[in-house]
Image: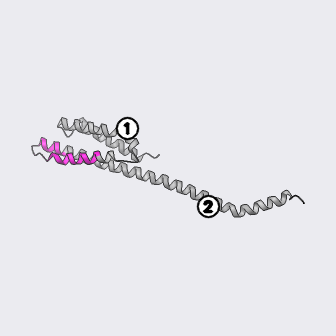
Amino acid sequence: MQAPDSHSILATAKELWGYIGPLVGLYAGNSFSRSAQRKQWLLDRRKEELREVVSAMTQATIELQTYLAAKGAGTEQPWSLWIDAHKAAFRIVADRIYIAEDLAQRDIPNRYIAAALKLHDSNDPESSAANEMGEIINEVVKLATKVK
């Protein structure tokens, strides 16, 4: 029996690669595309959660400042408006999935609550605690604009 020469083996391999190559390329391209889509989906979820946190914290801050301003003017508003906004903000911060680690690393929930209590105790809607709350909110905004 005669051994196949290297030229015919190479020709056969080239012919097989002509059939298999495009399939391998399709599979690899599809895998890369799915990976990129998943990464983008995760980034979108993070930004969505961060937007919700910023919105809830901003609303709670506004309600507390409004309460304190009205209290200072002698036209007190119901305390429950701030309590409800504060509870909503805390719930939204606490139930995040994709950004929980980022918030915990920066101690944002505890810092925000401490600043809110400090603002409440100051009875001054323009105190340094209000600025602290704003800085914490801005820190969350920066997280949302940071690309990972």
- Residue 89 lies in magenta, yes or no? yes
Q: Residues within 10 Å of mark 1 (few under 14, many from 20)?
A: few
Of callouts 1 and 2, the N-terminal one:
2
- Residue at the (28%, 45%) spot, across then down: 90
Res 8 quadrant in image: bottom right
Q: Amino acid at mark 1?
A: Arg
Q: Which mark is residue 4?
A: none
For the rendered model, the colour scheme is: one colour
The chief SS type of the magenta part is helix
Q: Which mark is residue 106?
A: 1
Single out the residue that lies furthest toward the right.
1
- Residue at the (28%, 46%) spot, across then down: 89
Question: From the viewer's perspective, is 139 left or right of 19?
Answer: left
Nearer to me, 125 or 52:
52
Which SS class for mark 2? helix
Question: From the viewer's perspective, is 24 left or right of 120?
Answer: right
Question: From the viewer's perspective, is 139 left or right of 59?
Answer: right
Nearer to me, 74 or 33:
33
Q: Which mark is residue 26?
A: 2
The image shows residue 46 at horizontal and vertical percentages of 41, 49
Single out the residue that lies furthest toward the left.
74
Which portion, as a residue range, is magenta?
66-90
The image shows residue 120 at horizontal and vertical percentages of 19, 38
Q: CA distance from mark 1 to mark 2?
A: 43 Å
Q: Is residue 135 visible?
A: no
The image shows residue 13 at horizontal and vertical percentages of 76, 59
- Residue 30 lies in magenta, yes or no? no
Q: Residues within 10 Å of mark 2 (few under 14, many from 20)?
A: few
- Residue at the (33%, 47%) spot, across then down: 53
In the rendered image, the quadrant that contains the N terminus is: bottom right
